[in-house]
Every structure is written in structure tokens, then in C-alpha cells.
Image (cartoon, rainbow, N blue to C red):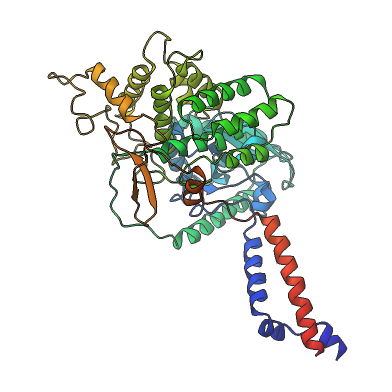
């Protein structure tokens, strides 16, 4: 009898402590999913709808699948806000979809295609030293040399950077095939094992997607300019791109300091002043870490709308989450800087922006294009950036891959936005354009215009011909607009253990009575 009281039957436990039992059950389910595979429905991914591409949070292979350390993996590291990453995604989908149909004796049949979003999985991308995106790696077991006898043993994975362009699929496939044949032992059993793993992971993703609900609301482009989009872009570039690169050397540290200074001068209220204090601490010897920097970004109370890994867009909203968003927001941020910064200052805003792009814009192709702009100190920075942006829109207008089919690239401003910006021949009147841009992007904290969104929450935006409004009370704005991340796991577990011990004690007392 004493043993029964000391170790009560589970049926009695469930009956008397149902809440604790439910908590235990939910935690067990949570831990079952604690691997390196990401649920694409719950996390931002360019490959949410592509069962053939496995979304990963990391490269701890033994946590992905028992066979993962024995098989070759083709992994693209990308940023879901990178235009070039979006443009190459269809080619990667095509490659991944063709792996199952590869000939029986083709080593590509062993490969699993995967993807890591560096905008979300920062620690993984820093471990891999990803300094530009998209970047392709082929991972293979290191002790599985070609010509070896017997099966491979799990060990540290070797990695190879794929140099061929994914747009040239034939050459890309040949490079991957050549690396596998040269570095890995392949036999029938190994082929079956790797194919079985890939199909198992794809089935899991298909099952996750089965419960996904899709909105049937028609998409309508927003032609108003929301201040929260500018703040959202500033938040994400600080949260993601600075964290990815780090501030461990003089070049990036100087670039971010100069950029924050012009943001502070041009756009007060965005939180650049608080981040400059964090930069000063690093200059004075405080070691940079992703955790401490992101804490500083959160503490800066940047007035974006949404949550750290789910910034919500209005002006820059696309017809799908994989369209527009961050790239559009960065252009709004840059235009707002050129309009509102003191033109007579010591630092040219365009030079500061280009230097920031040089170190922190992770999209390699986008960075190279932006650095090619020949901005001058003599010209009007507002018009120079406007011309550059319209040149980009003209270059990208014919490109369909990664482009939003419902929001075409257009020359800005169009007649709907500014009826006086073109002359009788249809060409831009730059004097009128300059006037319009200075009104459109004017930053004014004292003038606030509010409306409500579809959920009844206040929205903040500014319209053509009116000064840009902003929040009068930044603290209230932050409470209204920013949803914090979920409770950290270690805090949750500490609370859970405390509740469990107390509940067990109460249960024991009840049993004694």
C-alpha cells in the first residue's frame, strides 16, 4: 500500500491532475518535433509549397533523420527578402522535383534538396560563414570515399560550394554529379537508403501542408505610404543583416555607425539613437554577439508592425508572402533618408547608404547592382536615388521569376499618384517630381493620421500632399504594434518544472489524507 501511495497509478494521476497531464502531453509533442526540420507553414520559406525541397533550421544531420549523415545533401542558403533568391527559386524547385525521376544509376537520385532561410536561421548561417546569398553547398559524409568497400559510417560531413549557376541547370547537375562520384562510395543499398530518407522527409512536409488554410480574399495593392513599412525595413535590416554579418571588424562597424547617424538625423523616432549607443559599447570593447545585438534592436523600440520573424507590410505587401516585402521597404527607407536628411551635412546620404549596402546587403547580385550607381555629391540626392530606382524597375520589368504578377514594376510616380509629374509629351518633369517626392516622404512626428485595419487596430500612414504622420507616444505605439516572440524555452521549462513539483506535492498531501 505504501508503494502505491508513493507511486500513484497514472489513471488516478490523470483524474486528479488533468491540467498537468495536458501540459506534459503538449511538451512531449513539442520535443518530438525538436529537430532540424522546419515547418514551412509556420516559418517563412520560399519553398512552402514545394514538397521536393526540405526546409531546414540547421545542419545537425543526426537530428534530421537517422540516414541523413550517410547521404548527400544539396542545400541552398538564401534570404526570403532577396530578389535574386526569389528569381532563382523556380530553377531550384525544378532541380529538386527531378531527383525522384533521375535514372536508377544516376548519383543525383541519392541527393536530397534542402533550403535554409538566413533571415530566420541566423545562427546556422553564421556557423556556415554565409556572407552572401543565394549560396549552394553539397554536404556528404567525410569517411565515404569513392571506391571504398562496404557501407559508409556516419561522421563529420564534408562540404563543397557549388560554383555553377542554378539558372544553367545542365551544368549545375554535372558539377554536383562530378563531386559525388569523386568523393563518395555509392552502391545499391546506399542508394535505396538515401532515396527512402528523402521520400520520408517529403511525406512529412506534405502532411504538415495538409492542414494549411489559404485565404480567399482577393489581393488589392495599397497605394498609400505607411510609415510602419519604413520602420519594418529598418528593423529587419538591423535584426537580420547586421546580425548575420556581425560587427567584429572596422569596416562593418564604421558603415553601420555612419548609416545609423543619418537615420537618426533624417528619421527621428525610428530608434537609431539607441542602436548608436550599442555600437559605441562595441567600439569601447564590448564583444559583439547576435544575442546582445538583437536585444539592443528590440530595446530600441523600432515602430514596425508585426513580430520579429513576421513583420507585416502594407505599402509593400505582395499578393503572396514570397513577393515584395523587405526589398520594397528598403527602397522606402532609402528614399525617406534622402528627403529628410540635411543636404548640407558632412556625410553624403547616398555614400552612407552605399557603404551600408556594401557590407550588409546579403543578396550578392542586388548588392553589386546597387554599388554600380555613380552617385555624386553635387547632384540632388533625392532625384539621384529616384532615377536609380526607376532604372532598376525598368530593368526588372520583363523578369517574371520571383516577381509579383499582380504588382508590375512601374515607373514611379505614375499619373494616379502624381498628375503633375509628367509634361505634355509624357516625360517626367523632374522639378515637379522633386516637389512631389519631398512631400511624399516628408517625416513629421507631430502630424499623425490614423485609421483602423481589418482587425480594428489603429494604422498609421501618410498620404500624398500631406506631411508624414507618426506616433505621438512611441511607448504606446510599441505596445499596440509589436508582438513579442514567444516565451523562451528555458523560461517555459523552469516554470513548468516548478508547477509540476508543486502539483506533485499537493497530490501527495491529498493521498496522505
Q: Quadrant of the C terminus?
A: bottom right
Closest to the observer: 477 or 89? Answer: 477
Picture residue at 65% right of the left edge, 49% below the top: 68
Q: Is 361 positioned to the left or the right of 280 in the image?
A: left
Give the image location of residue 327, x and y in percent: 42, 33
Q: Give the quarter of the image for residue 434.
A: top left
Q: Nearer the viewer, residue 476 or 430?
A: 476
Instruction: Say if 493 sits above or below 416 in the image.
Output: below
Q: Is residue 364 visible?
A: no
Residue at horizontal 29%, vertical 49%? 219
Vertical side of 51 occupied by 76: above or below: above
Residue reaching furthest to the top = 378
Which of 130 and 510 lies nearest the eye of the viewer? Answer: 510
Which residue is depicted at the point 54% across and 24% down?
261
Left/right placement of residue 433 relative to residue 317 reads left
Which one is in front, 76 or 503? 503
Left or right, 493 with respect to 43, comes to right
Q: Quadrant for residue 122, please give it.
A: top right
Q: Is residue 287 visible?
A: yes
Residue, far left: 424
Image coords of residue 225 (percent x, y): 34, 37
Q: Is residue 447 above or below residue 398?
A: below
- Which quadrant holds the N terminus? bottom right
Residue lying at the far right in this picture: please name it.
2
Residue 368: percent from left, percent from top: 47, 20
Q: Is residue 27 above or below residue 478?
A: below
Q: Going by the image, does 139 lie left or right of 465?
A: right
Q: How many marks?
A: 0
Residue 43 place in picture, x, y as percent = 51, 50
Amino acid at each position: 500500500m505504501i508503494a502505491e501511495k508513493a507511486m500513484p497509478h497514472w489513471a488516478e494521476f490523470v483524474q486528479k491532475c488533468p491540467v498537468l497531464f495536458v501540459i506534459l502531453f503538449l511538451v512531449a509533442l513539442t520535443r518530438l518535433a525538436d529537430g532540424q526540420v522546419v515547418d514551412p507553414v509556420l516559418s517563412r520559406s520560399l519553398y512552402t509549397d514545394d514538397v521536393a525541397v526540405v526546409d531546414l533550421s540547421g545542419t545537425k544531420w543526426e537530428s534530421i533523420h537517422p540516414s541523413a549523415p550517410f547521404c548527400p545533401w544539396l542545400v541552398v542558403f538564401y534570404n526570403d527578402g532577396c530578389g535574386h533568391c526569389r528569381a532563382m527559386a523556380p530553377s531550384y524547385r525544378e532541380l529538386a522535383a527531378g531527383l525522384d525521376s533521375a535514372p536508377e544509376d544516376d548519383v543525383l537520385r541519392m541527393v536530397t534538396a534542402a533550403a535554409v532561410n538566413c533571415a530566420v536561421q541566423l545562427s546556422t548561417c553564421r556557423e556556415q560563414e554565409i556572407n552572401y546569398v543565394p549560396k549552394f553547398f553539397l554536404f556528404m559524409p567525410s569517411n565515404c570515399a569513392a571506391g571504398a568497400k562496404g557501407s559508409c559510417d556516419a561522421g563529420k560531413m564534408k562540404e563543397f560550394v557549388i560554383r555553377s549557376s542554378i539558372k544553367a541547370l545542365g551544368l549545375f547537375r554535372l558539377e554536383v554529379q562530378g563531386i559525388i562520384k569523386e568523393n563518395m562510395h555509392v552502391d545499391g543499398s546506399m542508394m535505396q537508403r538515401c532515396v527512402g530518407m528523402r521520400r520520408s522527409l517529403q511525406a512529412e512536409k506534405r502532411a504538415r501542408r495538409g492542414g494549411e488554410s489559404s485565404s480567399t480574399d482577393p489581393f488589392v495593392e495599397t497605394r498609400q505610404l505607411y510609415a510602419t513599412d519604413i520602420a519594418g525595413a529598418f528593423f529587419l535590416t538591423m535584426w537580420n543583416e547586421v546580425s548575420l554579418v556581425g560587427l567584429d571588424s572596422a569596416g562593418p562597424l564604421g558603415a553601420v555607425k555612419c548609416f545609423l547617424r543619418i537615420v537618426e538625423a533624417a528619421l527621428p523616432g525610428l530608434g537609431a539613437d539607441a542602436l548608436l549607443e550599442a555600437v559605441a559599447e562595441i567600439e569601447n570593447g564590448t564583444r559583439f554577439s547576435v544575442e546582445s545585438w538583437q536585444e539592443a534592436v528590440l530595446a530600441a523600440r523600432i515602430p514596425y508592425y508585426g513580430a520579429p520573424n513576421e513583420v507585416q507590410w502594407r505599402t509593400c505587401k505582395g499578393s503572396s508572402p514570397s513577393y515584395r516585402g523587405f526589398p520594397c521597404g528598403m527602397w522606402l527607407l532609402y528614399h525617406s533618408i534622402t528627403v529628410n536628411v540635411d543636404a548640407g551635412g558632412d556625410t553624403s546620404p547616398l555614400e552612407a547608404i552605399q557603404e551600408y549596402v556594401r557590407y550588409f546587403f546579403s543578396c550578392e547580385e542586388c548588392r553589386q547592382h546597387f554599388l554600380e550607381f555613380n552617385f555624386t555629391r553635387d547632384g540632388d540626392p533625392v532625384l539621384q536615388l529616384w532615377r536609380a530606382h526607376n532604372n532598376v524597375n525598368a530593368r526588372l520589368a520583363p523578369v517574371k521569376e520571383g516577381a509579383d504578377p499582380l504588382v508590375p514594376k512601374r515607373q514611379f510616380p505614375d499619373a494616379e499618384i502624381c498628375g503633375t509629374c509628367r509634361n505634355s509629351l509624357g516625360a517626367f518633369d523632374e522639378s515637379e517630381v522633386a516637389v512631389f517626392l519631398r512631400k511624399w516622404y516628408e517625416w513629421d512626428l507631430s502630424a499623425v493620421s490614423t485609421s483602423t485595419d481589418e482587425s480594428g487596430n489603429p494604422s498609421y500612414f501618410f498620404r500624398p500632399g500631406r506631411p508624414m504622420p507618426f506616433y505621438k507616444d512611441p511607448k504606446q505605439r510599441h505596445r499596440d504594434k509589436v508582438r513579442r516572440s514567444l516565451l523562451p524555452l528555458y523560461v517555459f521549462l523552469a516554470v513548468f518544472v516548478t508547477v509540476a513539483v508543486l502539483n506533485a506535492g499537493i497530490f501527495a498531501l491529498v493521498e496522505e489524507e
